[in-house]
Amino acid sequence: MGNLRIVRTWRPRPPVVLVVDDDPDILRLLGMCLEAEGCEVRETMSPSAALERLDRVDVVVVDQRMPEMSGTDFIEAARSRGYGCRFLVISGKRGARAEAAQAGAEGFLAKPIGMRDLIGEVERLFYRGFAPPSHRACAAAAPTSGAPKSSS
């Protein structure tokens, strides 16, 4: 797994990732891979239990096909409760990508998934909400396109 390391020069903090999958082997494999990359990982096999663990979670990796609740139903339930975390759906089902996007997932991986792809998607979703401090300062100082020009 050492070859998979994604090097970042700036990281606001470790991403908090919740993995939801009804297969205990897949659950642990995904968790171990993400932990090796420095993520703080929480795992659960139960989507309903996961709904109670979404506080302070940045990214949720959720299997689409589970007996208790589908991944898209899980996302809709989480959104209806006001959670703003980002969702990555994993599925082997045809047509699941569009279904996941319609439910509000920002990421999708088709099975079988590669660990490099998983890490890349989690990183992409996590960093979407952040910019390095220097970029934030530049963005704050930049004029907006609709701002009136000063007449000096």
Image: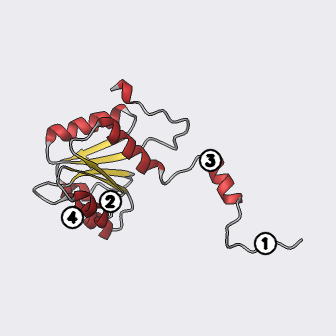
* Residue ID at (56%, 50%): 131
Q: Any mark on residue 78, and which?
A: none
Q: Marks 4 and 1: which is nearer the front?
A: 1
- For disc 3, the marked residue is 133
Task: Name the residue type under label 4.
Answer: Asp
Tell me if label 4 and label 1 are in contact, CB under 8 Å: no
Residue 48, image x, y percentages: 19, 59
Residue labelled with disc 1: 149
Q: Answer few, some or many: residues within 10 Å of disc 2's Cα (few below 14, many 20 plus, some between 14 and 19).
A: many
Q: Earlier in the sequence, mark 3 or mark 1?
A: 3
Residue that badge 2 annotates: 105
Read off the residue under disc 4: 73
Please provide percent x and percent y for residue 85: 38, 57
Tell me the element at label 3.
helix
Q: In the image, is 1 to the left or to the right of 50?
A: right
Residue 72, x across and y down, in percent = 23, 62
Percent position (x, y) of residue 53?
A: 29, 54
In this picture, residue 8 sits left or right of residue 50? right
Dot 4 or dot 1: first in sequence order is 4
How many neighbours does mark 3 have within 10 angstroms: few (below 14), some (14-19), or many (20 or more)?
Answer: few
Q: Tag 1: residue type? A: Lys
Q: Quadrant of the C terminus?
A: bottom right
Pointer 2 or 3: first along the chain? 2
- Name the residue at 12% across, 58% down: 68
Earlier residue among tags 2 and 1? 2
User: In the rendered structure, which amino acid carries the disc numbered 2?
Assistant: Ala
Label 3 – label 4 distance at C-alpha: 36 Å
CA gap, disc 2 and disc 1? 39 Å
